[in-house]
Amino acid sequence: MCIKQFVIFPLVGMLMLTAAGCGRNDAGTEQQVIADNLLQSAYRARQFQRIETLADSLRNVGSISDLKYDYWMGYANDKLMRKRLAEFYWTTGVSTFDPGYNKEETEVYAEMASRLAGLKCTMGEYEEALKVADKAVAELQQMGCDTTSNFTNLLIYIGFCQSHIGQQDEGTAAETLEKAFQQHLGFIRRQESGEAYRLAIIGLTNICYNYSNLDDYENLLFWANRYDSLVNCYGRTGLAADVYIDKQHGRSSVFRAKALDGLGRKADADSAFAEFRRTRFSETPDGAILAAGYQMSANKWQDAAESWNYLDEFSDQFSEGYSLEDIQLTFLMKYESNLKAGRMDSAMATAMEILSNLDSTINVTRRTSVIEQETIRRKEAEMTAEKAQMERRRWLDRVAVMTAIICALLIYIFVHNRMSARLKKSHEELSVAYDRLEETTAAKERIVSELRIARNIQMSMVPGVFPDMGGLDLYASMTPAKEVGGDLYNYLLLGDKLYFCVGDVSGKGVPASLFMAQTTSLFLTLAKQGKSPAEICTCMNDALSDNRTNMFVTFWLGLVDLNTGHLSYCNAGHNPPVVGCGDDGVAFLTMRPNLPIGILPGMEYQGEELESIKGRSLFIYTDGLNEAENKEKEQFSDKRLLDILRRTPFGSSRQMIEMLSAQVETFRQGAEPNDDLTMMYLRIAP
């Protein structure tokens, strides 16, 4: 009786604690949702002081974590122009982040690190900003959280810092910003949405502002052209409002105008600025003030003075008084423009407005600085006290854990003694069954091993290295549906002539792989003899028609002159290739019908020609692409393939194939592949 009580009471106690903990967790989750909704509501209403009050209250009752508290307090103070206080909260949150946090907390950390790096950049503290961004990027990469917009923003801030602290000449900043831009393009390719485009455009806008502030006109022109190109792509999707596209075209035109003027290309700069003038954005106060910056850099003082007249329309945002930043970035520039334009009355009026507000602005800045310092001192004292209290809690937690471990150990010993006899008997029975299973497993492992070897042999028969020569971009991939498959691709380069082919053997598995090997060998042998595509198909058909398995192969074979772009080809019952990509007139290639190879002996195959494919892409594939199925048995389809190629600008052959592979995987939604998938992409520079 005593032993039973000794075992049962700890078990009951532990169950009660677990149940109580679960109840608290459910209630805590509900409180967190309510807290998040309150903060988001204040955020949308731009009630920054309310955010500060809410964050403080919600943290005190345990409805939000310390990490969220630091983020929201930093955000509110940043918007209230208390930059040092915002820096303090964000620095505290970033320094206490634990990589073991859940996904939501990790996203808060990434957002906080991005804002902190951006704040330090605006304050000119580029080395400190670089430390914050580098550390956050390394942690997010290690956690596998490197595919978010905040991660991309951190890369952009790293590029800014590198360009400001002397790493620009080594190409480091350019490489970092290029990586960030390619990641934005990756977001767009994976899911073409308005949000993905807008995030990419925001990134390009910030990059252009960075190089504009540095007067780095070469890089500014490069990124401004990319900016305009991406806006054009977004506009063609139909996802964007006209007023948004108009505004972005206006911005990119001003950036290009400044870059061209700085490079001494005055006529081109005037042309770019004329494009800006044709936008509706140029007639808004925002547009006019953006134009004023270019006009000042181009020494067009009369035009700049006219543009700065729009500053009066922003008077409502200064209802609570100016900041020193307002005076520096706007009113002093307005004063300078009027002065150099010879508009002495306007310059004097602006100077009087600055003087009338400068004293109060300085006093407000001093008061804000005192408030920030006092708040930081108080918060540091609170953090020290909280740390000591946390240490005491940890000590009590250790005692509780040790007590629970001792109870669990005693329970384990009791249960173990009762179960050992049963386990001994079960072990003897399992031993007999295991011996039988071992024999079956060994046989199965031999089969798996042999199939693995067969797959390796088959994959070695298709080239994994592609020609590296100017003007030719060629890449291909093959993914068998089973351990081995019947798809094939190959190429042969003879001087300036390139033979290339894609085929699909009927059936799957080992028989198809053997037929595939024979087909590949025949192609290479006949191509080395310099035969035409039609002659090669005719010879291959004669050699393969006499097979007892009644197997055949659909085959597409091309021969292109790399100097002229002239293409000779022969299609043996294969899917029609796609010519073109992006805006390059995407369409299926029209071809004569020929039977697949291996069906009818003695057949003479007919070939066809294209005058030139220079500057156009050629995509050949097997039906494992357009007939790929998802769990609902819906096919990927020719239409979806053409839609993807039409809206995707050509980057490189490898990039296009990897993008299409990812699209097929996404479409399948986890369904097993129903056929081998082979793709080849080719492009000859014009």
Image: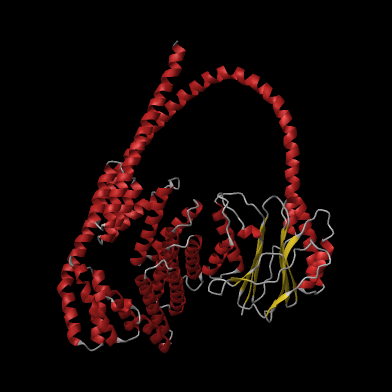
* Residue most extreme to the top: 1
Identify the residue shown where x is 82% and y is 61%: 544
- Residue 540 is situated, as x and y percent measured from the top left of the image, at 81, 65
Q: Work out whether residue 429 or residue 488 is closer to the camera in this orientation and state it.
A: 488
The quarter of the displayed image where residue 402 is located: top left
Residue 606 percent across, percent down from the top left: 76, 73
Q: From the viewer's perspective, is residue 522 above or below residue 471?
A: above
Q: How many marks?
A: 0
For residue 568, side relative to residue 196 (left or right): right
Determine whether, in the image, residue 357 is placed left or right of residue 548: left
- The type of colouring in the image is secondary structure
Quarter holding residue 60:
top left
Quarter location, residue 339: bottom left
Q: Which quadrant holds the N terminus?
A: top left
Q: Quadrant of the C terminus?
A: bottom right
* Depicted 181 relative to depicted 671: above or below: below
Please determine whether, in this image, residue 654 is positioned above or below residue 627: below
Task: Provide residue 433's location: percent of width, then percent of height.
Answer: 70, 27
Q: Is residue 664 something that shows in the picture?
A: yes
Indicate left or right for 512 with 147 as reference.
Answer: right
In this picture, residue 201 sits left or right of residue 56: right
Query: Residue 572, relative to residue 387: is it above or below?
Result: below
Instruction: Compare residues 575 and 251 and report the one nearer the observer.
Output: 575
| Camera-nearest residue between 654 and 126 | 654
Q: Position of residue 427 (x, y in %)?
A: 66, 23
Q: Is residue 85 visible?
A: no
